[in-house]
Image: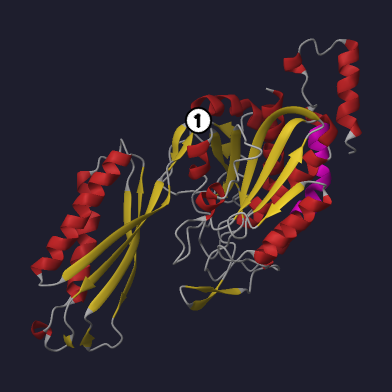
């Protein structure tokens, strides 16, 4: 569809008097949907290409180059290396108006893919000094493709746009790599991504297990704040047959994990503020009959209440110290935030529901879904400007979402039928915001 179609229909409507007030002067839904359908073969091709060539956080050089090249081909103003590998595309409409931002993330994970897809990843990368397999096991390949599709459609309507759309392609959503002080969203913000032009609002989405093509979110706290926790236990090495001659960090580690699990389960009311504290890695020892002198643990803390989080951290650190001291060991406890609470602006959330229904279809939007303990650094954008982040169901056809492979799983895949819904959601949320 050419960009002239919406303009022509709008002119005819105005001439006939069928659009009596400026509030009704909206781009036609049917014509926009047709434009979206027109770009879908390219969207699917992008998704498969990005999927086959994943890159870890702050190493998304091939990905960023492809994104920038396409945005330039659309005639957008393009800024690269915003937050190391981040890309920003600025679409200035033919008429003055408001400014809105749309965001997608670009990074992959150190996961060995097991989907069996013909375009499955065989890529590797460097993570924590080691060569690891890399895969788009969280769906960021789909996010990239959908936002590029939306940029293509909106660029085709440039003359009719009253305002500006900022397309943010963000690196390192999965957290700052070791040695980096900031993750992707925080670094892009520090380097001015929300300035010149300054968006009044921002929207983003994430594919997750769910009924294909449905959209769900909630106002206020939607996705948990995420902290990385690191614990190092120091003991004294000894022969495995003489544990009393050393200080057994393996025994201490087992007690530390049990203490953290019990502390969370028995002191936090899960019905009021969902809280998850998980120890996920343990590194200790090199030989079966030697008790090592050090054990390193790492994990994640997910919370929805800042005061409660601070109190739990204080008590957990004290408990770990006490457990270690009981065995004659010592412990180093450190915590670092990966993502703040995803907090959807209430007014914007209410306004967005019918817009998303326009994109997904009647009855396919749930704007009152329960909170989820997964996290997203989109939250840092929301700390600066009002925003709404929502989920797009992408389970395979005929598969119960409760049993479909979750994000970060080696088997995680995206149902490509839902990509068109995501592109429409991006396009309509930007357009309708500019038309408000």
**Up-down: is 365 above or below 20?**
below
Q: Is residue 38 magenta?
A: yes
Question: Residue 31: horizontal and vertical position, in percent?
Answer: 83, 32
**Is residue 264 visible to us here?**
no
Residue wearing tag 1: 345
Left or right, 76 with reference to 231: right
Q: Foreground: 203 or 402?
A: 203
**Up-down: is 292 above or below 251?**
below
Q: Quadrant of residue 124?
A: bottom right
Question: Residue 137: horizontal and vertical position, in percent?
Answer: 56, 61
**Residue depicted at x 54% and y 71%:** 112
Figure coloring: secondary structure
Query: How many numbered dots are placed on residues in this image?
Result: 1
Quarter of the picture containing the N terminus is: top right
**Residue depicted at x 79% and y 27%:** 27
Quarter of the picture containing the C terminus is: top right
Most prominent secondary structure in the magenta stretch? helix
Q: Is residue 259 magenta?
A: no
Question: Residue 280: horizontal and vertical position, in percent?
Answer: 35, 64
Question: Residue 432: horizontal and vertical position, in percent?
Answer: 69, 28
Q: Point out the stretch of residues depicted in magenta.
A: 31-43
Left or right, 360 with reference to 157: left
Left or right, 215 with reference to 313: right
Q: Foreground: 62 or 354?
A: 62
**Is residue 16 visible to us here?**
yes
Q: Which element is circle 1 on?
A: loop
Q: Foreground: 164 or 358?
A: 164
**Residue depicted at x 86% and y 22%:** 10
Q: Residues within 10 Å of mark 1 (few under 14, many from 20)?
A: some
**Up-down: is 340 above or below 279?**
above
Left or right, 152 with reference to 289: right
């Amino acid at each position: 569809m050419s960009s002239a179609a919406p303009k022509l229909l709008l002119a005819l409507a105005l001439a006939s008097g069928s659009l009596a007030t400026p509030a009704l002067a909206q781009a036609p839904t049917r014509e926009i949907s047709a434009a979206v359908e027109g770009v879908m073969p390219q969207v699917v091709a992008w998704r498969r290409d990005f999927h086959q060539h994943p890159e870890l956080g702050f190493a998304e050089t091939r990905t960023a180059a492809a994104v920038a090249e396409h945005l330039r081909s659309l005639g957008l103003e393009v800024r690269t290396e915003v937050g190391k590998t981040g890309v920003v595309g600025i679409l200035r409409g033919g008429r003055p108006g408001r400014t809105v931002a749309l965001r997608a993330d670009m990074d992959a994970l150190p996961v060995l893919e097991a989907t069996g897809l013909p375009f499955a990843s065989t890529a590797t990368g460097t993570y924590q000094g080691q060569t690891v397999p890399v895969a788009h096991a969280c769906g960021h390949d789909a996010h990239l493709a959908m936002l590029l599709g939306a940029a293509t459609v909106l660029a085709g309507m440039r003359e009719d746009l009253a305002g500006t759309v900022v397309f943010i392609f963000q690196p390192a959503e999965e957290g700052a790599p070791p040695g980096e002080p900031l993750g992707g969203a925080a670094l892009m913000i520090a380097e001015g991504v929300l300035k010149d032009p300054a968006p009044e609002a921002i929207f983003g989405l994430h594919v997750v297990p769910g009924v294909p093509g449905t959209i769900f979110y909630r106002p206020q706290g939607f996705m948990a704040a995420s902290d990385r926790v690191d614990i190092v236990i120091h003991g004294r090495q000894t022969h495995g047959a003489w544990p009393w001659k050393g200080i057994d960090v393996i025994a201490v580690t087992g007690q530390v994990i049990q203490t953290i699990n019990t502390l969370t389960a028995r002191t936090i009311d899960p019905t009021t503020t969902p809280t998850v504290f998980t120890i996920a890695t343990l590194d200790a020892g090199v030989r079966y009959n030697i008790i090592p002198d050090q054990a390193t643990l790492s994990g994640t803390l997910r919370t929805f209440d800042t005061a409660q989080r601070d109190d739990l951290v204080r008590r957990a650190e004290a408990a770990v110290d006490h457990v270690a001291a009981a065995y004659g060991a010592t412990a180093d406890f450190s915590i670092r935030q990966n993502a703040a609470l995803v907090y959807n602006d209430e007014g914007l959330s209410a306004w967005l529901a019918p817009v998303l229904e326009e994109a997904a279809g009647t009855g396919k939007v749930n704007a009152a879904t329960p909170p989820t303990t997964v996290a997203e650094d989109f939250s840092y954008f929301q700390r600066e400007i009002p925003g709404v982040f929502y989920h797009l169901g992408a389970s395979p056809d005929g598969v119960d979402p409760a049993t479909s492979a979750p994000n970060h799983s080696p088997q995680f895949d995206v149902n490509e039928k839902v990509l068109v819904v995501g592109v429409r959601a991006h396009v309509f949320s930007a357009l309708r915001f500019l038309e408000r």
